[in-house]
Image: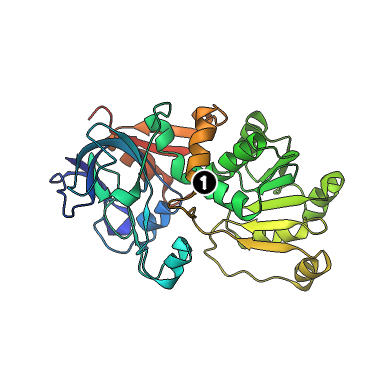
Amino acid sequence: MKSVVVHTGGKMTVEERPIPELNSSDDVLVRIAYSGLCGSDIPRIFANSSHFYPITLGHEFSGHVVSIGEDIYDLQEGDAVACVPLLPCFECDECKKAAYAQCKHYNFVGSRREGGHAEYAVVSRKNLLKLPENASLLQGAFLEPITVGLHALKLAGGCQDKEVIVIGAGTIGQLIIQAASALGAKSVTAIDINPQRLALALETGASHAFNSATLSADDIRQKTQERRFNQLIIETAGTPQTVALSLDIAGPKAQVALVGTLHKDLTLNVSTFSHILRKELTLLGSWMNYSNPWPGSEWQQATQLFAEKKINLETLIASIGAPEQFVREVTALAGKPMTGKILLDMTGS
């Protein structure tokens, strides 16, 4: 089979690998249809931050079931499925409290083990969600990223009638903007430094958009003054500047959900820290996208949003290509963030 293999130093190659075999009675062999590049994959490729090399990444994928282990009775050959990449142990104290994202002994498809940037992948039954008949395989490849945002919304008690502000309008941010708009937010504001991303946000669900490269925190706070109550601010960019911005612009008693992963130290000045206290802000850390019952209501909610045609994916896709094109597109990033989702298309292989 063809597999996109990442080596140290940012080198990516398309290689012929053996089709993986079932090793357990609850294993499933999946023929991949689409597999997306995640922002978290970029440092694994370009900053030597993967757990091992060479490795086949990919944890946002969909495909069809080819074969199943003898203990599986709820899947059959030909079923359309999407990857649920976390594999908790289900036995530690955290798992018993349904804190799966805090499992002490977890595995992870496409990070701690081989992933979906290939023609085939073998995963545990627990790592698959059977797609409903009205869901497409392309939608299946977006289930994991959209549930990241839905998990944050769930932790915040939903977004109904709230003034939602999304800081960082990349793929995760754009999906949150669309989901919040569909789920009854009173308003949705997008903040980013990229004019194209802001324009896209306005097309797909945002009611307001502000460029934080040209506007100060004071300017943005002034522009959101009329919407300062019952705010839910969701930070997805994962930079010290955007985390500070989310606290600086927050209105009284706002919720601030932190979704983006920091790669540099965050230092809060006295004024920003004072905002947390004086405004009585609620800070929510959101990690991954799982809840009880496994894998969580977020995944069912995502499929429902797709079924209701509330999510527009076409505008979020930068490229869809076969392995060779996929390697070219990813290599061209040279470690920089994506401007749109890059997808591996294995349907023609």
Examine the rendering and report whether any part of residue 339 can be seen. no
Q: Position of residue 251 (x, y in %)?
A: 81, 55
- Residue displayed at 46% across by 34% down: 318
Tag 1 residue: 298
- Residue displayed at 38% across by 39% down: 329
Q: Quadrant of residue 321?
A: top left
Does residue 107 lie above or below 33 as drawn? below
Amino acid tagged 1: Glu
Q: Position of residue 277 (x, y in %)?
A: 79, 70
* 127 to the left or right of 247: left
Where's the N terminus, which quadrant?
Answer: top left
Q: Position of residue 18 (x, y in %)?
A: 12, 46
Residue closer to the observer: 10 or 122: 122
- Residue displayed at 29% across by 59% down: 8
- Residue displayed at 65% across by 54% down: 156
Where's the C terminus, which quadrant?
Answer: top left
Label count reads 1
**Which SS class for mark 1?**
helix
